[in-house]
């Protein structure tokens, strides 16, 4: 049960990280900070990763170093997967599974 809860909490943190980026007025500076945060999360969750934190760190690193925001599509795909994971977990908890 702990592992499943850990995965849900990681998904929630990842969703919030992406939402911080989306709402940031200065995307480049925000992406630079989120890159560091995601890298740290990757190290903290190495034994039981639910999210590919290194991939998120790489995306934010790319955004912080480039004016090319086309990689934001990758971020949106990850966001959709994370949101789906959270919705599924909420459905199971409502059913007491």
Image (tube, rainbow, N blue to C red):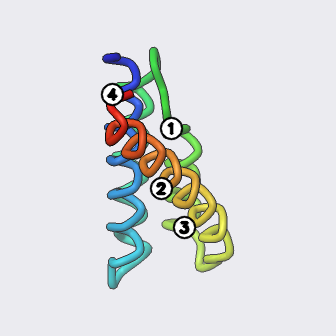
Asked if the residue at tag 4 contacts the one at tag 3, i.e. Cβ–Cβ closer than 8 Å, the answer is no
Mark 1 / mark 2, whichever is N-terminal:
1
Q: Secondary structure at mark 1?
A: loop
Would you name the residue on which mark 2 appears?
Answer: 83
Mark whose residue sits in front, 1 or 2: 2
Would you name the residue on which mark 4 appears?
Answer: 5
Determine the CA span between mark 3 and mark 4: 30 Å
Q: Is residue 40 visible?
A: no
Q: Secondary structure at mark 4?
A: helix
The residue that appears at 35% across and 25% down in the rendered structure is 44
> Which quadrant of the view contains residue 34?
bottom left
Residue furthest out toward the bottom: 25
Determine the CA span between mark 1 and mark 3: 19 Å
Would you name the residue on which mark 1 appears?
Answer: 51
Q: Is residue 86 visible?
A: yes
Would you name the residue on which mark 3 appears?
Answer: 63
The residue that appears at 39% across and 27% down in the rendered structure is 97
Q: Secondary structure at mark 3?
A: helix
Q: Is residue 70 above or below residue 84?
A: below
Neighbourhood count class around disc 3 (C-alpha, 10 Å): few under 14, some 14–19, many 20 upward: many
Asked if the residue at tag 3 contacts the one at tag 1, i.e. Cβ–Cβ closer than 8 Å, the answer is no
Mark 2 / mark 4, whichever is N-terminal:
4
Q: Nearer the viewer, residue 55 or 77?
A: 77
Indicate the position of residue 83 as horizontal and vertical percent values.
47, 56
Indicate the position of residue 25 as horizontal and vertical percent values.
33, 84
Q: Using residue 29 as the reference point, say whether residue 70 is left or right of it.
A: right
């Amino acid at each position: 049960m702990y592992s499943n809860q850990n995965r849900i909490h990681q998904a929630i943190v990842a969703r919030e990280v992406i939402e911080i980026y989306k709402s940031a007025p200065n995307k480049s500076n925000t992406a630079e900070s989120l890159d560091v945060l995601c890298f740290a999360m990757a190290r903290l969750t190495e034994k039981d990763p639910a999210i590919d934190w290194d991939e998120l760190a790489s995306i934010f690193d790319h955004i912080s170093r480039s004016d090319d925001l086309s990689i934001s599509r990758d971020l949106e795909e990850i966001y959709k997967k994370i949101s789906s994971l959270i919705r599924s977990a909420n459905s199971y908890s409502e059913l007491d599974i």
